[in-house]
Amino acid sequence: MHQLKIGSIPLPKIYVCEQKEAKECRRLGVPFIIKPKTWSDEKLIIAVLWRTLHKKFPNIDWIKVLKVSNTYQFRHLQVNYPVQPEVEVVSSQYRDNPGYDTCGFSDSAMQVTEDNEYRMTGGGLDPDDKLDFDDEARWEKQTIDDYIGDLSYQVNIDELQTLKLLPKFLDDITNAIKINLMNTAWCDGYNKKLGCNLGRWDGVEQAPNLIILDTSGSIPSGIASTMITLIDTLRHQANADLIITSRRSEYWAANTELPDPDKLSYLIGGCNERVQFYAILRKHIFGKHWGNVIIFGDNDAPDSRRLDTHVAIYSANRDPDYKIKDNELQSTKIDRIMAFHTYQKKIPGYGLWAKKAAPKAEVVINTDWAGTMKGF
């Protein structure tokens, strides 16, 4: 028997026990869950947070992500809790007569005193009853969802990731960044005192990272909305600058505050734009060394032929040189390109410039990530 704790998630006090320990929980008067014999601790955590996960990320296919075959037990896991008697305070007033007739003229002789009578009500208890939690009649049951309620605004995404409750592609990105951070260089050297060749590992300075997220109309809404919710956590883990592009493109440096997902939702849907995207590349991206450029999107690209008709005319009026030049690309160094295409094993359109800038850069392609979202 132990108290249910999941990291720092604010759970009400609930104890987890086996069937044979239920009587002891009743004796102690503590709320408890009887853990099914075949359940692991991991499965119990999923059951407890099932509603919260759905509420926080409604467009993630949780059955697929968590490899769950039967959710009936999750939705019907019950908390046994004692019915606490309600205490009703009944106030009564009486006058204290000192023993002589004051005829109502003496305030000091006639005093009003309050005496509180405490009466236990509810749960079939009489005032003189002794509360006995061993009695099963004193207990009620409620599903874990209803007992705990919605914690979606209180749980930390980093903590859910640590618990292995989020899609694996988040770990893929985080691990790739960590590997880049741990890159080291071996420096050879001869040690005269010892008369042998010795060397040392010198840490290589970590280049900044960049994330590009396409949330335009061709991206399924479930993917776009989920990524908008996750993107702030992801960019902090990667220490990355961020570009979100759709009907407009916006940029946030790694050390700047990002609006909350509700405020970012205006960037979901619409056509693809390139005037602002190219301006962002020129102002913030070109001419720098990037460790990882991470792109989420599909085939749509800022230089797609289907965009030329209306965008090229619009661009020509403001910036005759809207097309990216070779010298701009060659001024930029990229170590690794991480491509998260929604359905093909290729670099998404808004990351093609990175491949042109660094044709020898390592390319990591992941197409499984989109399959964890609903509506795709």
Image: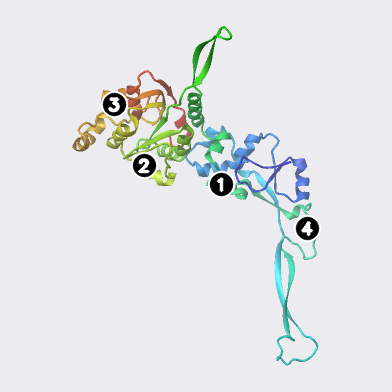
Instruction: Say left or right for 357 vs 145.
Output: left
Q: Horizontal and vertical percent for residue 119?
A: 74, 67
Nearer to the camera, 38 or 314 = 314
Residue identified by numbered label 3: 328
The residue under label 2 is 267
Residue plotted at (34% across, 31% down): 285
Q: Amino acid at mark 4?
A: Leu
Give the distance between the C-alpha atoms of the residues marked 2 and 1, in whole angstroms.
26 Å
Residue that badge 4 annotates: 131
Q: Give the Cα separation between the discs numbered 3 and 4.
A: 79 Å
Residue under pointer 1? 151
Circle 2 crowding by C-alpha within 10 Å: few under 14, some 14–19, many from 20: many
Q: Earlier in the sequence, mark 3 or mark 2?
A: 2
Characterize the local packing of mark 1: few (<14), some (14-19) or many (20 or more) Cα atoms within 10 angstroms.
Answer: some
Contact, mark 3 vs mark 2 (Cβ under 8 Å): no
Q: Of helix, strand and loop, which one carries label 4?
A: loop
Q: What is the CA distance from the residue labelled 3 to the residue labelled 2? A: 27 Å
